[in-house]
Image (cartoon, rainbow, N blue to C red):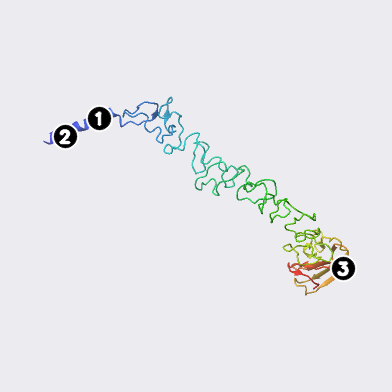
């Protein structure tokens, strides 16, 4: 009984070997050649699993097999959107099976994808997104500041900033914060009528320089508005060879200036003052280490003016 069971086992094993040999299922399909290489009645199985007409690049190709007429080189045979010659998409994949993952997505290295490429998700090549209108210039991208340079640096479709949206660049708009496409400017002072508080006075506008004429030349909203003939905000130590020399911008029509110097910002400690017809003074006192001197300067003739901002950025209208 035991011997007959042994023979039955041998017969079953032999039958299994014959069956496997006949079917060829122990072999593997390693060629894409239009033939049933492994004898399982299937032709070129595994050559093009994703059906994109490109054979898996890990398999050898002989001729032009019907299963993948476009050739081989498919670097991801489970994704029909990935094959040689496919359009590169910024998605963290090597879509065209050439030059690596997301090649050409961010050529200038500014972390923004080229505006001409589709972006899916947040690919590592360009974590800040797409929309880069010049992918060869790292200073041009949707997050760059827009400046007056004749270049669309922030990729908004406009060469230069236009804050009020009137179709004129802020670089040339005479009222950059007010819609005024016609650029009316009756007094010819460069400040448009729509934002000029004195459209008939060429000496008064928001950013006008102060003139020694006994009045305030700035419009409301401009630095220095409310002060008359001030100078102090345009003064400072500008001579690198002589750090004790205090100078200011000459004021139109002024012939004499008064200066005030103190050892503290509120002008109560050790004050000195004097008059000069020049635009610089040096009182021959060199500040010691870590010592500060504070100055004010204002026009005195022909019209006495305000001092403007002192060294602590406080506006002063009268003499300390």
Q: In front here: 206 or 108? A: 206
Q: Check disc 3 and report the residue beneath it.
A: 275
Cβ atoms under marks 1 and 2 closer than 8 Å: no
**Between 313 and 213, which is closer to the camera in this rendering?**
213
Q: Nearer the viewer, mark 3 or mark 1?
A: 3
Give the CA separation, mark 2 to mark 3: 129 Å
Horizontal side, residue 276 vs residue 37: left or right: right
| Residue drawn 16% across the image and 34% down it | 6
Q: Secondary structure at mark 1?
A: helix
Mark earlier in primary sequence (2, 3): 2
Q: CA distance from mark 3 to mark 1?
A: 118 Å
Describe the element under mark 2 as helix, strand or loop.
helix
- Residue 19's tag is 1
Q: Are marks 2 and 3 in contact (CB under 8 Å)?
A: no
User: Could you tell me if the residues under marks 3 and 1 are in contact, i.e. CB atoms within 8 Å?
Assistant: no
- Measuring from the top left, give residue 88's x and y in whole percent: 52, 39
If you read the primary sequence from the N terminus, does the residue marked by circle 1 or circle 2 appear first? 2
Image quadrant of residue 302?
bottom right
Vertical relation: 34 (above or below) 142 = above
Mark number, residue 6: 2
Mark 1 and mark 2: Cα distance apart in space? 20 Å
Q: Position of residue 100 (x, y in %)?
A: 51, 39
Q: Is residue 274 visible?
A: yes
Q: Is residue 287 visible?
A: no
> Taking 236 as reference, is 21 above or below it?
above
Of circles 1 and 2, which is in front?
1
Give the residue displayed 19% in from the left and 31% down from the top. Answer: 11
Q: Quadrant of the C terminus?
A: bottom right
Q: Dividing the image into 4 quarters, which one contains the N terminus?
A: top left
Q: Are there few (<14), some (14-19), or many (20+) residues within 10 Å of tag 2?
A: few
Q: For residue 263, which numbered disc appears in the image?
A: none
């Amino acid at each position: 009984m035991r011997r007959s069971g042994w023979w039955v086992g041998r017969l079953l094993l032999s039958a299994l070997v014959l069956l496997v040999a006949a079917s060829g299922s122990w072999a593997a399909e390693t060629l894409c050649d239009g033939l049933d290489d492994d004898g399982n009645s299937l032709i070129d199985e595994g050559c093009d699993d994703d059906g994109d007409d490109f054979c898996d690049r890990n398999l050898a190709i002989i001729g032009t097999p019907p299963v993948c007429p476009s050739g081989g080189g498919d670097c991801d045979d489970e994704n029909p959107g990935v094959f040689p010659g496919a359009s590169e998409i910024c998605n963290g994949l090597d879509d065209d099976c050439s030059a690596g993952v997301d090649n050409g997505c961010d050529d200038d290295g500014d972390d923004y994808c080229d505006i001409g490429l589709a972006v899916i998700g947040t690919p590592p090549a360009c974590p800040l997104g797409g929309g880069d209108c010049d992918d060869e210039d790292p200073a041009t991208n949707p997050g760059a500041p827009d400046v007056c340079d004749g270049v669309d640096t922030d990729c908004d479709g406009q060469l230069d900033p236009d804050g009020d949206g009137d179709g004129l660049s802020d670089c040339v708009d005479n009222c950059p914060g007010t819609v005024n496409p016609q650029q009316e400017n009756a007094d010819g002072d460069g400040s448009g009528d729509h934002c000029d508080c004195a459209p008939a006075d060429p000496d008064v506008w928001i950013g006008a320089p102060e003139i020694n004429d006994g009045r305030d030349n700035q419009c409301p909203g401009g630095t220095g508005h409310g002060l008359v003939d001030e100078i102090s905000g345009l003064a400072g130590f500008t001579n690198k060879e002589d750090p004790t020399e205090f100078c200011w911008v000459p004021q139109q029509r002024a012939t004499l200036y008064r200066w005030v110097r103190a050892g503290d910002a509120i002008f109560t400690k050790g004050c000195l003052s004097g008059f000069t017809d020049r635009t610089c003074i040096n009182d021959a006192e060199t500040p010691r280490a870590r010592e500060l001197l504070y100055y004010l300067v204002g026009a005195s003739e022909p019209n006495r003016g305000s001092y403007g901002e002192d060294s602590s950025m406080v506006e002063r209208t009268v003499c300390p």
